[in-house]
Image: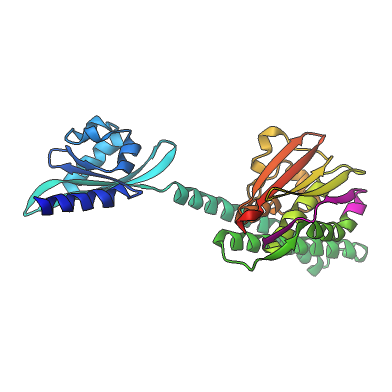
Amino acid sequence: MQALKRKQDEFDQITGNMKEGLVLLDHMGRIISINPAARALFGANADCVGEDFLTIDRKRDIRQAVGAAKERGHSSFRAKKNGREYQFDLSRIDSEGSVHGLVILAFDITEQVNAERNRREFTANVSHELKTPLQSIIGSAELMENGIVKPDDMPKFVERIHKEASRLVLLIDDIIRLSQLDENAEMPHEEVSVRVLAEEVCEALSDAAKLKDISLEVSGDDGVMNGVRRLLYEIIYNLCDNAIKYNHPGGKVHVSVKEQAGMLSLCVQDDGIGIAPEYQEKVFERFYRVDKSHSKQSGGTGLGLSIVKHAVKYHHGKIDIQSEPEKGTAISVSFNTNEY
């Protein structure tokens, strides 16, 4: 009896710490054991032991899966529960030629499903984004090759090829950056002044700002933190680049850095076209564009804010966006410097 009790305690301890839901049924379909994860999943309590499994879940898919597992030895299906997606695997327990019961295992596959969906969407979007400039390059090259282009128009076609090729290079660079962030590979950290980086970014974007008559200003604290310099630069660059692209001629872009109580915040504010409330969360999705025609004209790849989102996440930071159409946008990024 002591040995059996010890075995039962070991079993309860193991199954109690499992993230997966586990239910054991006898040959009559009554619950022999149900671990905490399964109880939470099915909305049951410990008193359900000894009851028919159908008392805690009568849905058609689980009933059919139980019947199929009894008949064939194994069955599986996917279903949504409590806002999450689960994979249910059912296996028959056989011993000495007779059926003793069933094992039901439930795996939370929400992240896997989301990742697969994002991968498909990303692949489709990349294919489209690569195809568009390539078609333009091939079309222009064919016209030139066949002698259809007039000598006076030749510089225009060469410029188009150069512009589309440059767009391809930018797109590929952004895809590579996102792939590195997705892999969450370890990158070298160093002491970085966010204020100095912001000044470097504004210097790099000064020509683009002058073309649109946009003024750039940096203010605030030195903002020293331990981070990946290249990623922090990407965050500031993409935020400022967007603030210039989606601004009105004669507009302003203000970058501020603030240190307070172990927190470092960076805010990039403009008085441009703004973003409607329903689009403010979506702008951080890959290839999402609020105004596709404006984005094409400005030469964006649609990946800038997605890179910002992933680079901030890499540093365990947070993003906040405040925007109003035709009044401007302020995107703030905050980091807990005590974590480094």
Location of residue 231 in the rendering, given as x and y in whole percent from the top left corner = 69, 60
Residue 193 in the magenta stretch? The answer is no
Name the side, left or right, on which 73 lies relative to 14: left
Foreground residue among 179 and 310: 310
Determine if residue 16 is in view: yes
Location of residue 193 in the rendering, given as x and y in whole percent from the top left corner = 76, 60
- Tag count: 0
**Residue depicted at 84% across the width and 47% down the height:** 254
Is 236 rendered above or below residue 161?
above
Residue 224 in the magenta stretch? The answer is yes
Location of residue 74 in the rendering, given as x and y in whole percent from the top left corner = 23, 50
Name the side, left or right, on which 157 lies relative to 340: right
**Residue depicted at 12% across the width and 54% down the height:** 3
**Residue depicted at 78% across the width and 53% down the height:** 299
Foreground residue among 83 and 143: 83
Is 25 rendered above or below residue 55?
below
Is 174 rendered above or below residue 283?
below
Please report the bounds of the magenta region as a residue range: 209-227
- The quarter holding residue 77 reads top left
Location of residue 34 in the rendering, given as x and y in whole percent from the top left corner = 25, 41
